[in-house]
Image (cartoon, rainbow, N blue to C red):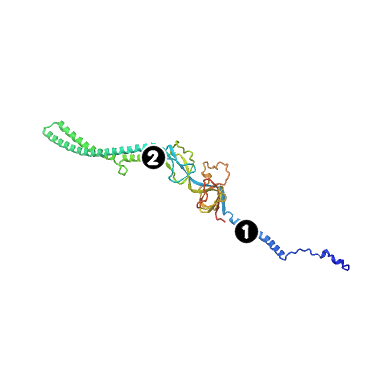
Amino acid sequence: MADADPKRDFVADSEIDLTPDVPAEAPRQKRWGRMLLLFGVPLLIAALGAYFYLTSGRFISTDNAYVRQDVISVSPDVSGRIVAVNVRENQRVKAGDVLFRIDPEPYRIALAQADADLAAARVQVATMATDTGSAAADIESARAELTLAQATYERQDALMKRGFTTRASLDAAVQDVAAARAKIATAPAAAARARQQIGSGGGSGMPAQIQVAMAKREQAAMNLERTTVRAPKDGVVSQTSRLQVGNITPSGVPALSLVVSDAAWVEANFKETDLDHMRVGQPAELSFDAYPGLKVTGHVQSIGAGTGSEFSVLPAQNANGNWVKVTQRVPVRIAIDGKPPRAMIAGLSTDVKIDTGAR
């Protein structure tokens, strides 16, 4: 051990290999990564730019859109006191269901009076028909009287020529002939007047008096039927607060509203600058604030004939010199395809996105 060389136990720092053990593939992987970053990122950016360039203007959207439904204002055709209410707020009804009833008693009385007037008209027509027969008999009587008066005149005239009668008797005979002829002239006019009174005057073959009475009777029967107010369509009843038993409801004034449940659409108000590529029939995607995550498909059904301000109660007047240009909104009707899984409540806020297909 004493003969060992101490210098052999010491290793110089320069003789130590400090290079880490790196696989031979590492430099190649780094080169590929740099190339990917160098070329891939610009290509990705270019692709995204091309996509947005090609699709810019293809989709137009607005959140100024709302669900619409047909709303029918139900009003009675006759006035009267409400005696029964068969519906409540937000109740679904079918076409023909009874909504409410008006007191029918005054209209039953009016119908009974119309029936009596019709019977009286028929009696009057029957009497006039009898008078027509009498007028025909009067014509025959007048002709007989004229024949007799003519014969009497001829006799008096012959006697007068021979001096066996007076001038007064001859004048009386002449007067009788004239009276008989006048009666013949007036009798046909009286018969014609009687026939005209029982005539129809309208080609129906029914006397005019009976036609008038029957029309009044039908009006009374219709008014009685209208005391029962029915639903004109399927829908949901709304605004029933005015329907209270005992209230007097006038005719023609809305008593409640009926929201038609099978006719929902979306009214979207697009800017006028969005209409360049919009056409009827283009597909649309609908989303609703009330139903997050729900997407409903539709299509453009029609484009409004005027802007919203054009149909406002007080349209803008731009001829006064204080004109400021404002982008106008045009109502576009979007039809809903199929039946949505959720209820389409009138007035729901909607987001509309239309695919115009433009590039």
The residue that disc 1 covers is 47
The residue that disc 2 covers is 224
Image depth: mark 2 or mark 1 in front: 2
Relative placement, left or right, of 118 versus 168 is: right
Give x and y (percent) for residue 338.
50, 52
Which residue type carries mark 2?
Leu
Label 2: which secondary element:
helix
Closer to the camera, 228 or 120? Answer: 228
Which residue type carries mark 1?
Ala
N-term-proximal mark, 2 vs 1: 1
How crowded is the residue under tag 1: few (<14 C-alpha within 10 Å), some, or many (20+)? Answer: few
Cα distance between the residues tagged 2 and 1? 76 Å
The quadrant of the image that shows the C terminus is bottom right
Above-or-below relation of 256 to 42: above
Closer to the camera, 205 or 288? Answer: 288
Identify the residue at horizontal 66%, vertical 60% (top origin): 40
- Mark 2 and mark 1 in contact? Answer it, CB < 8 Å: no
Give x and y (percent) for residue 329.
55, 47
Identify the residue at horizontal 58%, vertical 55% (top origin): 55
Label 1: which secondary element:
helix
